Image (cartoon, rainbow, N blue to C red):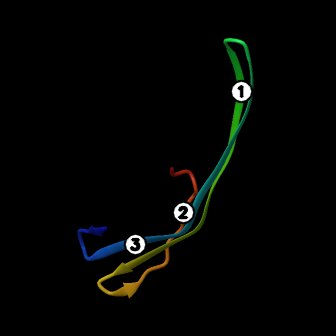
Amino acid sequence: MLFPGGVLVTSNNDQLGSVTGRIGYTWGPALLYAKGGYAWKDGNNISVTTNGVATAFTTNGNHP
């Protein structure tokens, strides 16, 4: 994303994944099942440049 003043912010997410599973049991007209899962994200690389020069920055990690 390019901001005014020549500030460019780029982000690269290397990995994104999820796994889900279901297990169930049926008897007569009834069905009982449970579903669970896990998701992860790894490798978020953020860089900032100002007019083509790398710029130091900090983040607080409170962004979705």
Mark drawn on residue 59 = 2
Taking the view exactly as shown, the residue that stands out farthest to the top is 29
Q: Earlier in the sequence, mark 1 or mark 2?
A: 1
Tell me which amino acid carries mark 2: Thr
Residue at image point 54% right, 62% down: 59
Horizontal and vertical percent position of residue 9 = 38, 71
In this rendering, position of residue 28 left or right of residue 41: right
Mark 2 vs mark 3: give the one in front: 3
Q: CA distance from mark 1 to mark 2?
A: 42 Å
Taking the view exactly as shown, the residue that stands out farthest to the left is 4
The quadrant of the image that shows the N terminus is bottom left
Tell me which amino acid carries mark 1: Tyr
Kind of element beneath mark 1 = strand
In this rendering, position of residue 10 left or right of residue 22: left
Q: Nearer the viewer, residue 10 or 16?
A: 16
**Relative vertical location of residue 33 with respect to residue 49 in this rendering, above or below:** above
Q: CA distance from mark 3 to mark 1?
A: 43 Å
Residue at image point 37% right, 87% down: 53
Mark 3 vs mark 1: give the one in front: 1
Instruction: Find disc 3 in the rendering and name its residue.
Output: 10
Mark 1 vs mark 2: give the one in front: 1
Quarter assignment of residue 23: top right
Tell me which amino acid carries mark 3: Thr
Mark drawn on residue 33 = 1
